[in-house]
Amino acid sequence: MDTLFHMQTLLIIAAGAIATYLTRVGGYVFITRMKRIPPRAEAALNAVPAAVLTTLVAPAAVTGGLDVSLTMAVALLVGLRLSLLPVLAIGWVVVMVLRQVIG
């Protein structure tokens, strides 16, 4: 009978967790020791949320199908006028309706 976890899998998960922890702690320590954050570094840090959002949305936009593409277009237009929570709710409703209609 196969075991639920292989040792190699557990080691990979542990290594990923350690690497994630060290990069987060290292970044925090690095930033807190700086007396002043340079303008270019501050601009780069301000661009991180948009970059992360792009990495999450781009694959779905390319491979998601017509329902996902139309929903993203609707969410973009609604997002120009409303805050985040209504955009999420409207996007969810639109994708569910399109999946029922388009099949």
Image (cartoon, grey):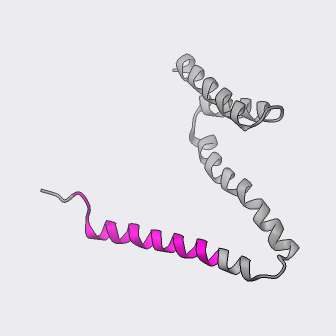
In this view, the residue farthest toward the right is 39
Q: Is residue 86 magenta?
A: no
Which secondary structure class fits the magenta region best?
A: helix
- Please tell me whether residue 54 is drawn above or below residue 32 in the rendered image: above
Q: Nearer the viewer, residue 53 or 22?
A: 22
Q: Is residue 7 left or right of residue 87?
A: left
In this view, the residue farthest toward the top is 101
For the point 61% across and 33% down, the residue is: 68
Q: Quadrant of the N terminus?
A: bottom left
> Which contiguous range is marked in magenta?
4-27
Q: Is residue 52 left or right of residue 14?
A: right
- Give residue 37's position: percent from left, percent from top: 82, 76
- Give residue 5's position: percent from left, percent from top: 26, 61
For the point 80% across and 73% down, the residue is: 41
Quarter of the image for residue 67 reads top right
In this view, the residue farthest toward the left is 1
For the point 84% across and 79% down, the residue is: 36
> How many labels sit on residues?
0
- Give residue 60's position: percent from left, percent from top: 59, 42
- Please tell me whether residue 65 is drawn above or below residue 59 in the rendered image: above
- Give residue 71's position: percent from left, percent from top: 66, 30
Q: Nearer the viewer, residue 97 or 60?
A: 97
For the point 33% across and 67% down, the residue is: 10
Q: Is residue 90 left or right of residue 83?
A: left
